[in-house]
Image (tube, helix red, strand yellow):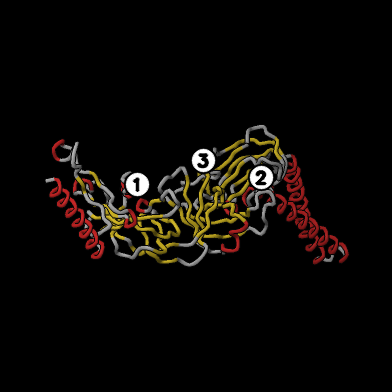
Amino acid sequence: MQNRGALLMGFDMTRTAVLRALLHCVGLLPCVVSVTACSGGGAGDGRAPAARIIDAPKDILDLRDSQTRSLQFVPAVLHSFVPGRTAVGSVDFDEDRAVAVFPPYAGRIGRVYVRVGDAVRKGQPLYTIDSPDLIQAESTLIAAAGVYRLTTEALARARGLYAARGIAQKDLQQAVSDQQTAAGNYHAARRALHLFGKSRQEIDAIAARRRVDRALMVRSPVSGEVTARAAQAGLYVQPGTAPAPVSVADRSAVWMNADVAEGDLPFIRRGAAVRARLMAFPGREFLGRVDVVGAAVDPNTHTAVVRAVLRDPGKDLHPGMLAHFLIQAGDPITGVAVPQDSVVREGDGTMTVWVTTDQRHFTRRVVTTGMRQDGFVRIVAGLQAGEMVVGKGALLLSNLYAGNPE
């Protein structure tokens, strides 16, 4: 019996060896199968069969339907990737549409008509100034207007007398000269008041009433929104002395200033597309185009400012907001792509995906990756468009594979 048992055991071992050799020849090994333990478990103890790796080099897993319910299956697709350079920067006012409204002359603020956030139109009053220079200019106008009227009347009388041979020609010429000088002084006084912001109607009223108007009205030079106000009644202000009493900006467009590393500058051109993401608006992108590439590099940070202009009719963006930029640095590239969840970085640094044809048998495949963009990873080598891969759950398969040694 012992010899018979030994003979049978030898036969079984030989049969197993032959079977393995045949399976190797037809390509069915190596594989991973669901195995029930011969003792101490299996169907008798109610535990589910575990996925076991029989031969590691093929990197194959075989799972039951119940084990694949949490997996997501997605096809590899062709996707357009835009080469770009990333940078960090901030939002700022479009300085071509922003104005610091200083008074034309020094004086004390009388009244303030606006507050921060108010919408204003071009020509709308912002604040008034009590200016000694304005009073002097209006006094000069009143005096010049009086002399102009007097010399004009005198010239009319002189012409009448000269026609009646009542005066000599030199007296008429003197009257003409006096009237022309007075007219020049009068018009110069009017132009001076125009510089103070007085309208033609206001100047006519001052000359007619012979009464000075102490208030110099400072008006908005552009339509937009009041973005800052330092003006207070009684505050003495001067032209060009910061801070400006009132600042006005058209916020329908903003600047995005990105600090770009000097090594990336050769790849960036004016007109290149820019995509910006801000912490204030997660999941939302703002689009613009490069308007200016800085000519100077900061010697401390070795970066240059690249400015993009962005239309913002909703006025969602506020100056000073931190932004992350992706600046186009070349023509789009179309390539095979899979979702980022599909790619697993292994312990040795290789990138892998799990490929399946029937959603039960899974092959781990090493791939070469490229750009990551829009939630996709470009697969440079190792995968064809149309092949089915595991999306969410790929990491779980890699962990399962690593936890079941041969």
Secondary structure category for the residue under label 3? loop
- Marks 1/2 in contact by CB < 8 Å: the verdict is no
Lateral position of residue 381 relative to residue 244, left or right: left
Q: Nearer the viewer, residue 218 or 308?
A: 308
Residue with the mark numbered 2: 102
Q: Nearer the viewer, mark 3 or mark 1?
A: 1
The residue positioned 52% from the left and 54% from the top of the image is 86
Q: Nearer the viewer, residue 39 or 131?
A: 39
Above or below for 246 versus 159: above
Q: CA distance from mark 3 to mark 2?
A: 18 Å
Return the disc, 3 or 1, that comes first in the chain's sequence. Answer: 3
> Tag count in the figure?
3
| Disc number placed over residue 402 in the picture, else none | 1
The residue positioned 74% from the left and 48% from the top of the image is 141
Residue with the mark numbered 3: 117
Q: Position of residue 266 (x, y in %)?
A: 60, 63
Q: Nearer the viewer, residue 6 or 153?
A: 6
Q: Nearer the viewer, residue 361 or 93?
A: 361
Secondary structure category for the residue under label 2? loop
The residue positioned 38% from the left and 53% from the top of the image is 343
| Label 2 environment density (alpha carbons within 10 Å; few <14, some 14–19, many ≥20) | many
Mark 3: which amino acid?
Gly
Q: Position of residue 371 (x, y in %)?
A: 45, 58
